[in-house]
Structure formats: C-alpha cells, structure tokens
Image: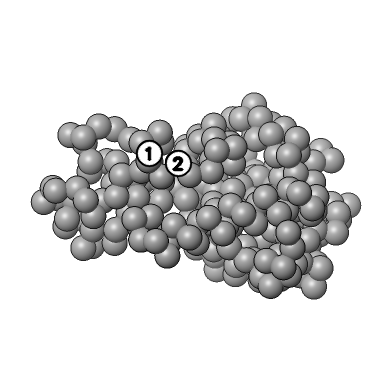
C-alpha cells in the first residue's frame, strides 16, 4: 500500500546534490530549496541550518583564499563557500576543506547567490506557516557519503515533524549482498517516515530511474499535478 498524503511539495534535505537531481529528473521539483546543492555528512548539520539558516559571518569564500592550490581548484571546479561549523579543518588544510565545502556549487559572496538562498529559506518559512504537506527527501550513497544511523534518521524525522506537516523519505543507495535478488527493501515504515534500501550504488539517475519511479508511484504516491508551482509558493505569505 502506498503512502498517499496529497503532498504539495517535494524538497531535498541532502546529503548532496544527487537528491535534488533525482527529484528534478522525476519532474517533482517545482521550486528551489536551501538544501538542493548543499553537502552535509551529519544530521546535526542539516538540523542546524533548518533552525538557524545561514550566518554569513561564519562563511569562508574560496575566492578570498590566497593559496596557489585553492586558486587552481577554483579555476577547475568553480568558487565555493566553506562553512566554519561544518567540514572545516583548519587554515593549513584548505585542500580537504575545499572538497567538502558545504556550499560546493555556490559563491555566497555574490549578492545574487546570497539572495537566492534567502528566498529558499523564506519558502521553508512559508511551508511551515501554512502547514503545507511536504515530502522531505534524504538520499544517501554510503560509498561517497557518511552512512547515517537509524537513530539519526529518527532524530531528523522527529525534528521535521515537530515543525512541518510532512513525511520524510530516506533512500540509501548501496550494493547489498544480502538482497541480491531484490531491487529494494523497505527498512522503516511509519506514518511520518519511510526508509528504503536500493540495491544499486550508482549516482547516475538513468541507473536508478526505474526504482525511483516505482517508489514515487507506488510506495510514496506523489501526484505531480498536486504540487505547488514556483509562482504559487511565492504568492503565499
């Protein structure tokens, strides 16, 4: 039986940009949200940003780092923004910090980018205030991400449900020797939380498309026509 709760929004909460990419490919992303391209490896980091948004005084912009290696990385991968609270090593280890930058695809020293994130967090406020039924999605690839424990998943779910009218969908993409014959396995099923193991570690949408379509059509029923559009969410107060 599917979880059909008449969702009005589908939003990524990380852990990388793959979640947002998969949601977009499925046609379920109707507007931008803060966690679309944020790199996180701790549930506490996600909760901190939900609770406190972005403190711009805590950011380090790689374009301001006077280091030959960082300048080369900027040229190769683009300017990034490092958050001192998350994945920050020290001033002598910017190489690792660069590759684990919280805002790996954004230069928040650019006023247009800063304004974009402010609008994204404002949409979360609108969703909370209007009790909009939301499906939050947390997709994890343990071979590149930190694997999240059952307790941490429950912690995030409890936090979200205390603030939002929502359901949390957690999908862990990995190669599981014990479910060779199965494409997926549901490991959590609650009123506000669904957890699914997918027996495929690929980060490519084309390799996950069939499973994802089945999940969103059958296990978590999301009707695209019911989702609020970019203009509709922005028109709400």
Compare residues 72 and 127 and report the one nearer the observer: 127
Residue to which mark 2 is pinned: 55
Q: Residues within 10 Å of mark 2 (few under 14, many from 20)?
A: few
Measure how far apart labels 1 and 2 are at the Cα level.
6 Å
Structure colour scheme: one colour
Q: Residue at x 78, y 61 (%)?
A: 8
Q: Residues within 10 Å of mark 1 (few under 14, many from 20)?
A: few
Q: Are marks 1 and 2 in contact (CB under 8 Å)?
A: yes
Left or right for 39, reference 185: left
Left or right for 212, reference 54: right
Q: Is residue 85 visible?
A: yes
Residue to which mark 1 is pinned: 58
Q: Residue 138: which disc? A: none
- Residue 67 drawn at (x, y percent): 13, 47
Compare residues 16 and 203 and report the one nearer the observer: 16
Q: Quadrant of the C terminus?
A: bottom right
Secondary structure, mark 2, is: loop
Q: Residue at x 53, y 43 (%)?
A: 53
Q: Residue at x 84, y 40 (%)?
A: 191
Compare residues 229 and 69 and report the one nearer the observer: 229
Q: Quadrant of residue 49?
A: top right
Left or right for 2, reference 237: right
- Residue 94 drawn at (x, y percent): 23, 41
């Amino acid at each position: 039986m599917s979880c059909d709760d008449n969702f009005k929004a589908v939003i990524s909460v990380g852990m990388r940009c793959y979640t947002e990419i998969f949601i977009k490919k499925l046609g379920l992303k109707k507007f931008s949200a803060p966690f679309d391209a944020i790199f996180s490896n701790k549930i506490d980091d996600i909760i901190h940003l939900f609770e406190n948004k972005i403190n711009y005084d805590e950011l380090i912009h790689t374009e301001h780092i006077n280091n030959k290696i960082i300048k080369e990385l900027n040229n190769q991968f683009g300017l990034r923004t490092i958050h001192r609270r998350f994945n920050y090593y020290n001033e002598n280890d910017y190489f690792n910090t660069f590759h684990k930058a919280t805002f790996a695809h954004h230069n928040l020293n650019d006023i247009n980018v800063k304004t974009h994130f402010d609008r994204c967090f404002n949409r979360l406020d609108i969703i909370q205030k209007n009790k909009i039924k939301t499906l939050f999605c947390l997709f994890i690839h343990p071979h590149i991400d930190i694997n999240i424990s059952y307790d941490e998943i429950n912690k995030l779910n409890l936090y979200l449900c205390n603030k939002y009218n929502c359901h949390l969908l957690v999908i862990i993409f990995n190669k599981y020797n014990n479910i060779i014959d199965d494409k997926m396995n549901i490991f959590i099923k609650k009123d506000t939380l669904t957890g699914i193991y997918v027996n495929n570690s690929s980060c490519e949408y084309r390799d996950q498309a069939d499973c994802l379509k089945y999940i969103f059509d059958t296990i978590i029923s999301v009707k695209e026509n019911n989702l609020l559009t970019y203009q509709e969410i922005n028109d709400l107060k």
